[in-house]
């Protein structure tokens, strides 16, 4: 599942516009006759995201100035990647030369033979060895490199410090277990006035996404190690649903309105009516800039449960039809745009600060060693948000197992949505039967996959 922010301020994901023809969007022509190597790239922020769009265009212009033999043609659309059209674009030759992917796409794109093998050219990417190995490995299949990670996220618990204080709770002491989440949520809901202690998603595949995150936090898993069978009908799986059921029906701490999606939780939190919900750090600027929240009131803690957290992210892969010149040019472009500490679209923290974009949010670290030290130094020097509100998240993540999403994630989440929505809308929901039915459906999906 995607996270919710494009860089700092924009919810983004992109794909080549369906109005574009295959020749305009694909990689059949590298324009070598003109003496330039031409590459198409996607995930340019749309014009509505004015700041990010301007930064993206500035960085492409500076890249082309430094590399006059390369012509970069950027495509914007919303979202960066539409799951409904992604495979069709790949199969139809409409994908850009350098194209955006979720972490969960990597193996699939390789399996259907639509990715270029970058291994012979990886030396062109100066930053490659500085990137976190666990992120590089996501795009490595059978020892060959097929993509480059760009950003990552991990789930945590966003909570409202002002409501914690109002409810008599210590805002500097976040709930570390699900029992503590339940107890704190009950106290916050008791404030009345439409205040909700804890909110969770249960529609549009987002309920399944959060079920997975909550299952990971308790040490469980959605699919077995062999990728063939569901592993949700377990003590951990039952604990996830039972906890949600009890908060909803016994404690009345989740409010009466259910079948929520991410925007609903963000609206509640931004308006000061929600105590806690699960999210990634990129929710924080949305809560402030779009939903009316205040940075000083919003804190981020590690996942309750202490066992694990769901991680996700994105990167770029290369079209199988790319020429060697296009692959080399694309790798140079990635270095310039995203993978140079303290510079580029993601790393130019000084530029972001001047544009009043948030700097200092607790994103997972992309780099290692000296590159990481430089990135953190520049970020700290330009921080304009209360970083102390996120320190427990950063400290706590060191002890959690980082787990990516399961195979066939969107299909599985659709199944799990039903289980989550049932316990939140039916007081007499049979948790055991819900998990059994979901397991059977997931087994069928995995068998077909």
Image (tube, grey):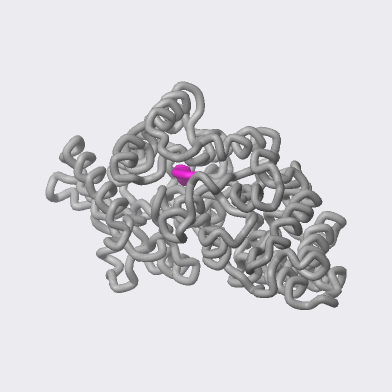
Left or right of 106 on screen, residue 91: left
Question: Which residues lie in the magenta part?
Answer: 146-151
Percent position (x, y) of residue 316?
Answer: 42, 49
Percent position (x, y) of residue 82?
Answer: 45, 66
Q: Which residue is located at x 63 percent, y 62 percent?
A: 408
Q: State whether the magenta stretch is mostly helix, strand or loop.
A: strand
Residue furthest to the top: 370
For residue 209, which quarter of the picture? bottom right
Decide which of 325, 6 is in the foreground and name it: 6
Percent position (x, y) of residue 445?
Answer: 69, 69
For residue 133, which quarter of the picture? top right
Left or right of 112 on screen, residue 246: right
Q: Is residue 232 magenta?
A: no
| Image height of 222 relative to 149, above or below | below
| Image height of 359 relative to 376, above or below | below
Q: Quadrant of the N terminus?
A: bottom right
Left or right of 256 on screen, residue 263: left
Percent position (x, y) of residue 104?
Answer: 56, 54
Decide which of 278, 153 is in the foreground and name it: 278
Residue 413 makes an appearance in the image: no
Decide which of 51, 370 is in the foreground and name it: 51
Q: How many marks?
A: 0
| Image height of 32 relative to 200, above or below | above
Q: Which residue is located at x 75 percent, y 75 percent?
A: 422
Q: Which residue is located at x 52 percent, y 57 percent?
A: 2
For residue 128, which quarter of the picture? top left
| Image height of 7 relative to 128, above or below | below
Q: Quadrant of the C terminus?
A: bottom right
Residue 355 makes an appearance in the image: yes
Left or right of 255 on screen, residue 153: left
């Amino acid at each position: 599942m995607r996270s919710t922010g494009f860089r700092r301020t924009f919810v983004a994901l992109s794909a080549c516009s369906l109005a574009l023809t295959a020749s305009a969007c694909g990689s059949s022509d590298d324009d070598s006759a003109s003496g330039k190597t031409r590459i198409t790239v996607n995930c340019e922020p749309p014009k509505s995201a004015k700041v990010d769009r301007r930064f993206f265009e500035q960085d492409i212009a500076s890249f082309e100035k430094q590399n006059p033999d390369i012509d970069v043609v950027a495509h914007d659309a919303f979202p960066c990647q539409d799951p409904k059209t992604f495979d069709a674009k790949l199969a139809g030759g409409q994908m850009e030369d350098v194209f955006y992917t979720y972490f969960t796409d990597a193996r699939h794109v390789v399996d259907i033979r639509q990715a270029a093998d970058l291994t012979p050219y990886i030396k062109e990417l100066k930053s490659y060895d500085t990137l976190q190995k666990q992120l590089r490995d996501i795009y490595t299949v059978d020892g060959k490199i097929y993509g480059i990670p760009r950003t990552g996220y991990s789930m945590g618990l966003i909570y409202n410090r002002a409501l914690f204080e109002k409810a008599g709770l210590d805002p500097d002491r976040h709930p570390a277990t699900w029992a503590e989440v339940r107890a704190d949520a009950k106290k916050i809901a008791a404030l009345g006035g439409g205040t909700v202690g804890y909110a969770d998603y249960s529609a549009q595949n987002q309920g399944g996404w959060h079920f997975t995150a909550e299952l990971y936090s308790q040490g469980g898993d959605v699919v077995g190690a062999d990728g063939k069978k569901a592993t949700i009908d377990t003590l951990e799986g039952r604990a996830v649903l039972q906890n949600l059921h009890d908060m909803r029906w016994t404690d009345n701490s989740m409010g009466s309105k259910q079948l929520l999606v991410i925007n609903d939780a963000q609206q509640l939190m931004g308006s000061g009516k929600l105590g806690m919900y699960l999210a990634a750090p990129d929710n924080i600027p949305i809560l402030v800039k779009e939903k009316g929240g205040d940075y000083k009131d919003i804190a981020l803690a590690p996942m309750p449960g202490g066992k694990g957290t769901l991680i996700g992210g994105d990167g770029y892969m290369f079209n199988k039809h790319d020429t060697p010149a296009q692959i080399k040019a694309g790798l140079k472009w990635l270095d310039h745009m995203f993978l140079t500490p303290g510079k580029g679209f993601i790393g130019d923290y000084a530029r972001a600060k001047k544009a009043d974009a948030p700097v200092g949010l607790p994103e997972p670290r992309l780099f290692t060693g000296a590159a990481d030290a430089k990135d953190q130094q520049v970020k700290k020097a330009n921080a304009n948000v209360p970083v102390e509100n996120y320190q427990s998240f950063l400290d706590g993540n060191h002890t959690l197992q980082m787990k990516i999403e399961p195979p066939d994630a969107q299909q599985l989440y659709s199944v799990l949505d039903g289980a989550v929505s049932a316990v939140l809308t039916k007081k007499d929901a049979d948790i055991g039967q819900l998990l059994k039915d979901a397991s059977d459906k997931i087994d069928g999906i995995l068998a077909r996959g």
